[in-house]
Amino acid sequence: MDDQTRRAWAYLSRVAEPPNPRLADLIVSFGAVEAADRIRRRALTDPRLARATEARFDIDSAEKDLELLDRMDGRLVTAEDDEWPRLAFGSFRGVDSKQRPQAHPPLVLWAVGPARLCDVAERAASIVGTRAATGYGEHVAADLAAGLVERYVTVVSGAAYGIDGAAHRAALAAEGETVAVMAAGVDVPYPSGHSALLHRIARHGVVVSEYPPGTRPTRRQFLARNRLVAALSGATVVVEAGARSGAANTAAWAHALGRQVGAVPGPVTSSSSVGCHVLISAGASVVTRAADIVELVGRVGELAPDLVRPVSVVDDLTDVELAVYEA
């Protein structure tokens, strides 16, 4: 990609709130450079796109954004690049955008880290859950993430406190690959308490966002981000969640995109497991170990081994002896 095209993509990523399918259509029709030029000149025939870009069309910080990205050893990934996860993002075409207006792939991805997005999407699972995690939830999230790394599955999450952080840390501790999908710019560590964690992810996995540098997170951006967490993963597993939560939203996106959905059962007395039990009752797979997730995302025939039952006094009895014992 030449410098002019790269600057055009960077400009376009800031000019409208993503995802914007009308902007994407303009780029498909004219290319990134011509699309950027038409927006700058206000030479748009689509009134809705004109309104969507009206507030930002004269803000061109592309060169500054790209310089910052270069200093971070990052890259701008577009649909023109080999790294673009085409198959994963192609799933958005099967979602009714009238029911889900955000059901569109990102325009670009700002990425920092050695992991290639196209490779990540081939064998990945997202582990998500509440920020207010219990000790049980954090323990299970860490155990699942470490088990996935052992089975060469990339761990995807949103870098939030609680379940997300536990999953990322465990994947790194197991020397595996993990992906943090951000609702802010890649240069904005959010939450700030995870600044060091995000730095480690950028060294060993990848930190990725559809938002340009300097972007602060909003509630809408968190909800939009969830669709990318689901899209980059073959399965989404909710470890702990309330009745209404961002994790449940991610699971809903996974279902809409045709991905597998799993949930970890918890104590019936715990409000942190209510969302998981709702998902299970709606058909989500019960997940209690990493092997269960591998069965969801793995190759055909890659099944979880049978659980080992505790040894009991009846294990070695013959059928006749068992009948007498149970009489």
Image (spheres, rainbow, N blue to C red):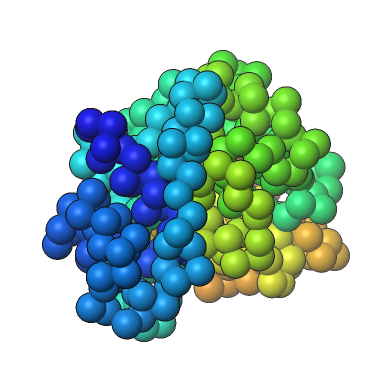
Identify the image quadrant of the N terminus.
top left
Query: In terms of depth relative to the viewer, which is nearer, 296 or 183?
Result: 183
Query: In terms of depth relative to the viewer, which is nearer, 112 or 143?
Result: 112
Q: Height in image: 96 above or below 162?
A: below
Question: Residue shown at 40%/30% (left/top)?
Answer: 75
Question: Residue shown at 55%/42% (left/top)?
Answer: 213
Quarter assignment of residue 185: top right
Residue 3: x and y in percent read 28, 32
Residue 70: x and y in percent read 46, 24
Residue farthest front in this picture = 41
Q: Height in image: 61 above or below 223?
A: above
Residue farthest top in this picture = 175
Question: Residue shown at 65%/30% (left/top)?
Answer: 198
Is there any visible trace of residue 19 in the rendered image? yes
Identify the image quadrant of the C terminus.
bottom right
Quarter assignment of residue 199: top right
Residue 239: x and y in percent read 66, 51
